[in-house]
Image: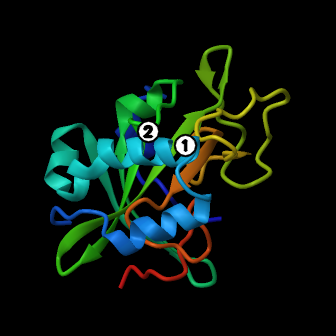
Amino acid sequence: MHARIASFASLVGLGLAPACSLDDELLQSREAEIGGFDTLAQQLAAARAATAKYHNAAAAEADGFGSTEECVSDPVLGTMGLHFVHGARLADPAVKIEAPEALLYLPQNGKPRLVAIEYVQLILIDGVPYMGCGVGINSCPPANPPPPPALYEGIAFNGPMAGHEPGMPWHYDLHVWLWAQNPAGMFTPFNPALSCE
């Protein structure tokens, strides 16, 4: 469908924005979208607290995130952004609210602006990332994939899905638009209100 994580194998090592805060208006829209301060709201607050320092892309790089250098966009669906991927987290089968596997940025005035985070859980078969037989939605799906992770209350991961380019295994993923409003929904992969331009 689209290339999402360039140089995936090298970023993971599988062997095969200026600082700003979430403004009151955006916070209120999040509360309205999720129905107030419940468990999900507390989980989102934990994710915001853990990723706020990454408004500075240099801090993300210092913590082990590497840029894929491609801003992903779809002419119909909208923009996903520039992925900064944490190889060690991606290779770890555990997913944690405070430790997303990827950060999504938009290029803005020559500087990356943090807009969202992404969680990725690779599908392991006998302890090995399952590669399928090619890139694409029907590239030999795993016969008995493990269930998707349960991370945020009431929110399902997308997948299982094939890798988006050679070298990327089958996986589950979940986008969370913590730092930019997404009219398509907080957990929708693409944001129709944003652009890579």
Q: Residue at x 75, y 54 (%)?
A: 137
Visual colour scheme: rainbow
Picture coordinates of residue 84, whole percent (x, y): 33, 52
Q: Quadrant of the N terminus?
A: bottom right
Q: Picture quarter containing residue 146?
A: top right
**Residue 189 locus on image (x, y percent):** 58, 62
Residue 3 lies, in percent from the top left, at: 53, 61
Asked if marks 1 and 2 touch (Cβ < 8 Å), the reply is: yes
Give the residue drawn at x 56%, y 69%: 190
Residue in the foreground of this view, choosing between 124 and 51: 51
Does 116 sit left or right of 33 as displayed?
left
Q: Is residue 39 left or right of residue 158?
A: left
Residue 90, percent from left and from top? 45, 34
- Going by the numbered disc 2, the residue's amino acid type is Ala
**Residue 107 falls left or right of residue 134:** left
What residue is disc 1 on? 168
**Who comes first in sequence, dot 1 or dot 2?**
2
